[in-house]
Image: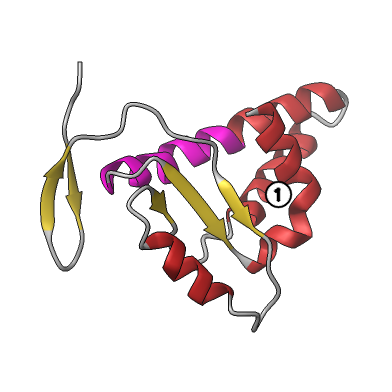
Amino acid sequence: MVTTSVACTKAKMSVVAPPTHLDSPVFVLCAARSGSTLLQSLLDSHPAIFAPPETNFSAAAEAIHFLCHSVCSEDEQRANSRALAAALSLASSVLDEECRCAGKTLWCDKSLTTLGHLELIQKQAISG
């Protein structure tokens, strides 16, 4: 069963059929003043890639990781598992949905904070 979603922007509103599945996300590792915003814009112009401006997703994932380790401090494996599930849920509820609404199949994050949280993002990408 395919449902339709309403994609709204300030410029237009259109009805699109969401993609049936999303590809694994892409994280662009970059330094400040390196031309990464131009790269993000070029990637976003591709018909399959949703590349919004800097989301700082990795910083949000790090905050979730910290929260879970604070709450489940006596069980590191449980804390890691809960942090992973929560970060993936965040990505799904926000980034995956926006990707689908844009009629695209892959989201890309280009944020300066990603490089500082690379190990955490790698764990989530491998597990997700």
Relative horizontal placement of residue 48, taking residue 17 as reference (left or right) = right
Quarter of image, res 72: top right
- Decide whether the magenta segment is chiefly helix, strand or loop: helix
Residue nearest the observer in this picture, 93 or 17? 17
Q: Please name the amino acid that badge 1 sits on.
A: Glu
Percent position of residue 7, x then y = 20, 49
Residue 66 appears in the figure: no
Residue found at x 42% / y 37%: 93
* Residue identified by numbered label 1: 62
Q: Residue at 37% of width from left, 57% of height from top?
A: 46
Residue 48 location (% of width, % of height) = 37, 47
Write the residue at 66% across / 43% down: 64
Note whether 12 is above or below 105 in the view shown: below
Dot 1 crowding, Cα within 10 Å, few <14, some 14–19, many 20+: some
Q: Is residue 112 magenta?
A: no
Question: Residue drawn 84% across and 31% down?
Answer: 73
Q: Nearer the viewer, residue 70 or 62?
A: 62
Residue 26 higher or lower than 77, as above or below: below
Question: Could you say which quadrant of the image residue 1 lies in?
Answer: top left
Residue 10 percent coordinates (x, y):
18, 67
Q: Is residue 128 left or right of residue 20?
A: right
Magenta segment: does it hold 96?
A: yes
Q: Is residue 108 visible?
A: yes
Horizontal arrangement in the rendering, residue 111 relative to residue 41 (left or right): right
Q: Label 1's element?
A: helix
What sort of colour scheme is used for the picture? secondary structure
Left or right of 104 on screen, residue 78: right
**Magenta region, residue range:** 87-102
